[in-house]
Image (cartoon, coloured by chain):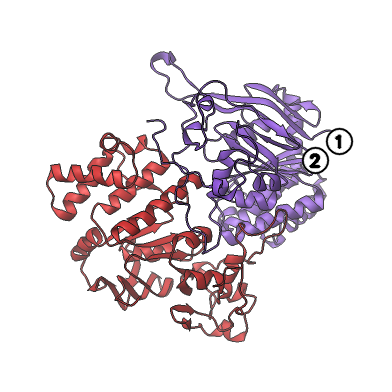
Amino acid sequence: MSEAPLLEVDDVTVRFPAPGGGLLGLSRREVKAVNGVSLTVRRGETIGIVGESGSGKSTLGRAILGLDPVTSGHVTFDGARVSDGRRDVLAGLRRRTAMVFQDPANSLNPRLTVAETLTEVLRVHAKVARGAEAARVAELMRLVGLDPALGSRRPRDLSGGQCQRVGIARALAVEPDLVIADECIAALDVSIQGQIINLFLDMKERIGLTLIFIAHDLAVVRRLCDRVAVMYLGRIVEEGPTEAVFAARRHPYTAALIAAIPEIDPDLRLPDAPMGGEPPSPLSLPPGCAFHPRCAYAQETCRTGEPPTLRRQDDHGWACILPPGTLSSPAASTLGRQPQELSA
Amino acid sequence: MTALPLLDVQGLSVSLHDGRETRHIVDDLSLQVGEGEILGLVGESGSGKTVACRALMRLLPEALSISARRITLAGDELASLGVADFARVRGRGIGMIFQNPASHLDPVMRIGAQIAETIRFARGASRREAKAEAIELLRQVGIPDPARRAEAFTHEFSGGMRQRAMIAVALASNPKLLIADEPTTALDVTVQAQILRLLTELRDRRGLSIIFVTHDLGVVSQLCDRIAVLYAGRMCEIGPKRAILGRPRHPYAAGLIACQPAAGATLTRLRTIEGQPPSLHAMPSGCRFNPRCPNAQGDCRSVQPPLDPVEPGHLAACFHQVGTTPRLGCAA
């Protein structure tokens, strides 16, 4: 790597006070939504962050943009430390980054037309001269595959896919160096999902977009992303180039996630024994490796002590004590384990 | 299917009358489900798949009118039944589960009591019998420590456990047919795999027939025996899973299969179906897919193609069908 990375996330932890907490808040507990996460994003790279609900993937995305406060650790964007909460640095960050949200209709102002929504962004960020706004709005709309004639419509007159394109156009309006897309296609129909994924692939080619794509759908991430980071209960458990992670998964959780993707193949049967259990509550993390209650390979050392740290080989990191190669055989990809009670 | 199908639906339509116009949300839908069979009902939002299922259960707002030439369940005619008689059938014959269990379970009633209530209503069992049976059902749907969990409330259950509890409620009346409307869409993939496994076990153990509504072709390909593809309220294609996935004839079915992200390498573009599904207020004439269809010709814009057999058990509604080249390497 000759070039300095665009974004560096260094040992970031995000904690929230848990609701409740007893009388006078005496027994106040904390949720560790993100727990010691490190991540490097280079310019022009698309990185997928995957995990199930409660894995902390959305919180991580929000913490990077300063939308949720970082409890400890650092976020460095283009050489400037943005996690200290200094207003001028944060303002600088927000001029150069943008977020696309899951629910396209609810993240747009229902009273503004598409053109007004986009013009507002251009004006706030003083991106173009007043006279050039209309032309830039039309250009942005064409960029995301929307007919500029739709500029006079309001969100309620648009389909879900069209709303999501407006959301992406709004993100691109600031000419961002980095876009964070949080589950931005999960609510769309399959035939429309493909259009949005192709749009991101286009943006990557044409304007060198750097993208953090947060999703639970591994198949989509495989299609779109150069690198992938798998999160479980606030930690990255595996990270590396997408094809390396898919071909040589080294964490049993990644293996289970991949095995659970329903591929279109009538000859494939449902796994006989899908991975049991559900992710435990982040409020009461199991000791040792947080994945051990669901892991078919768990050993005594996994149940106690410190969670395993990320080991690295070349560009591929994983947080598991298993020797590499254990999970490569196809038979090992279906983890045989009965559901057990996790947190009653 | 040699024997009589368990469920036989002929010409089901659901329409909305507003002023002078009648709009068909579901238009002349016919399908059969055999005993112990899982039929996947596939379509995008607005395709009418949920409305069709709710019509079978008569769970639709009064503004929508339902008509059908015939609906029989195990030989009993349902279409002509009055409201009270139908309620009994709905209780005993057909169960339904939904995408969001939290909004279909009673938040202030213990899980076990909800199941027991259904058992008592459907079969007139005593309180004690019903309670014991409720615990047994919870065990069958894979809830650990069922006797203790029966005393819990919905909010104390995780997402996957709520879905299991709702399945237990639906099974309480011992139905022959289970309608599952996107039951795994809101779940994590590893939990989805568990629920799909549970449904196949219930089919094997109880001979339960299932209509599984989804937009996820990956799920139907692993779960279902037959697949029906809906577009804009009409049936495009129906047939055995292998035929539909391996040799789809309707361009919409073929497009839907091709645009799934599962197949294909990193950083390659996905096939897409251009355009948007039509809105209820502006249905195209002829074949409703024609504005988005790569094969559309003049006749598609004026005449509605009939659902005709392509081969035994495999029907498609298209004048200009996709060639018979195998796709995805899964042609038999």
N-terminal label among 1 and 2: 1
The foreground one among B330 and A239 is: B330
Query: Which chain does tag 2 point to?
Result: A
Q: Do callouts 1 and 2 mark residues in contact (Cβ within 8 Å)?
A: yes
Determine the residue positioned at 80% across, 32% down.
Answer: A78
Label 1 environment density (alpha carbons within 10 Å; few <14, some 14–19, many ≥20): few
Determine the residue positioned at 62% across, 63% down.
Answer: B259
Quarter of the image for the N terminus of chain A: give it. Answer: top right
Amino acid on which the number 2 mark rests in the picture? Arg
Relative horizontal placement of residue A99, taking residue A122 as reference (left or right): left
Q: Position of residue A103 (x, y in %)?
A: 56, 47
The foreground one among B24 and B141 is: B141
Q: Which mark is residue A3?
A: 1
From the rendered image, report the letter of the chain displayed in purple.
Answer: A
Determine the residue positioned at 52% across, 39% down.
Answer: A53
Q: Is residue B232 visible?
A: no
Amino acid on which the number 1 mark rests in the picture? Glu
From the rendered image, report the letter of the chain displayed in red.
Answer: B
Q: Position of residue B137 (x, y in %)?
A: 27, 47
Dot 2: element = loop
The mark total stands at 2
Q: Which mark is residue A43?
A: 2
The foreground one among B195 and B205 is: B205
Quarter of the figure with residue A81: top right
